[in-house]
Image (cartoon, rainbow, N blue to C red):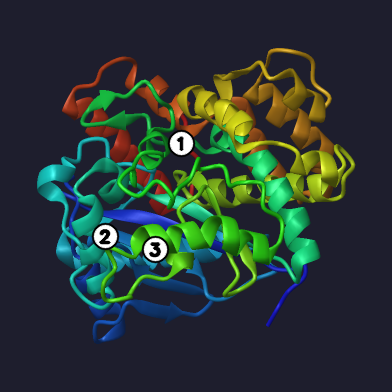
Amino acid sequence: MSYRLFEVFGIELEYMLVNSNTFKVNPIVDKLLTKKNGKLTSDVSNGEIEWSNELVAHVLELKTNGPTADLDNLSEKFSENIREINLLLKEFDSELLPTAAHPLMNPGTETQLWQHNYSKIYALYNRIFDCRGHGWSNVQSMHINLPFFDDTEFEKLHAAVRLLLPIIPALSASSPIFDGKSTGFLDSRMEVYKTNQKEIPEMAGKIIPEQVFSRDEYFEKIFMPINKAIKPHDTEHILDHHFLNSRGAIARFDRNAIEIRVIDIQECPKADVAVAVLIIEVLKLLVSEELIALEDQKKWHEEDLLQIFNGVIRDAENCQISNAAYLDVFDLQENATAAELWKKLFRRVESRISVKHKENIEFILENGSLSTRILKSLRQDFSEENIEKTYRNLAFCLAENKFFKP
């Protein structure tokens, strides 16, 4: 079934399993799914939420079980599932941990790929890219799926998504630490994501998608180069171009949706859904052309947008945006911060947002990205003990569906 713009949404959340005693990642998603389902399957339907495996054996994905129009009750539905999962994991001395990266994981020694169904695909990825790196095995994100009905709606949505992508990590950055150290990037996940697939650069492109605004153009300029580049490696023809496309937003013509992938997972579903709601409302504003005409949105080249994006993944909400033309789109003067830009956008759309989401968005805008709050909590003490203490607090926030306050 095809849906119209913003008629329904698909939300996907990824979490890591950790051992409650050692705090190390625990590659037992297969045991969890078997415990829940009675037998091992890659997907478990649990009412309105579905559970599924990922590339690595310690990451679990929770997603809306099909498209939903109800964002108001979604955080509670995710939270109910998280509580159930944590109860099931007690038998294995394990629990779910939020944020986009485990701060102490050693991917070189701790990575275990999923060994069950789809394992041939994962093994091929591992052969080409070597998935024992932070960018493959230590990244958790939220994906937002937005439908389009036809080429006309795809054009509007893709133009709006491309324009907004550079500043999304200012809201969502939650990965300031790898290997027990501050990386210098508030969104380290997106920094490593950029070079993950350097062996086949056609797959991720510039992260910001190219200026393509129809299905035929997308196949010609994005899918065809990907298929050509992967051909020497994929001798068994098991990889699909929808699966291979790794840009920060990808077109899923198999289900007529655009999937946004630049969003770090937050500390609890309440925060994730708040971020999603604000992004969706601003995309509606862009699609309406109230801020900028469609033809002008389409003129933005990915290189110019990438420069803004690079600054934002480094400094998140503190990033000084100096591109005057970009700020002008949002009626801001030169050298505004990403935080100021998001606050202005929120004021433009807040009348369309329910009171519950409004309060949650205001918390994020007032207190900063999760990365900022994590670093504030650590107070320059990057000892394993202090990092573990902070992240155990984050695990508590996830279990209780509460915001993290330093």
Element under disc 3 = strand
Q: Is residue 187 left or right of residue 285?
A: left
Residues tagged 3 and 2 counted as in contact (Cβ below 8 A): no
Res. 253 image quadrant = bottom right
Mark 1 lies on residue: 404
Residue 152, horizontal then vertical, whole percent? 80, 63
Element under disc 2 = helix
Answer above or below: position of 316 versus 76: above
Q: Is residue 175 left or right of residue 273?
A: left
Res. 71 image quadrant = bottom right
- In primary-sequence order, the first of circles 1 and 3 is 3
Amino acid type shown at disc 3: Glu
Mark 3 lies on residue: 61
Determine which of the numbered discs, if any, sits on residue 125 in the image. 2
Q: Residues within 10 Å of mark 1 (few under 14, many from 20)?
A: many
Q: Residues within 10 Å of mark 3 (few under 14, many from 20)?
A: some
Residues tagged 1 and 3 counted as in contact (Cβ below 8 A): no
Q: Nearer the viewer, residue 386 or 245?
A: 245
Q: Nearer the viewer, mark 3 or mark 2?
A: 2
Element under disc 1 = loop
Q: Nearer the viewer, residue 312 or 367?
A: 312
Q: Is residue 296 visible?
A: yes
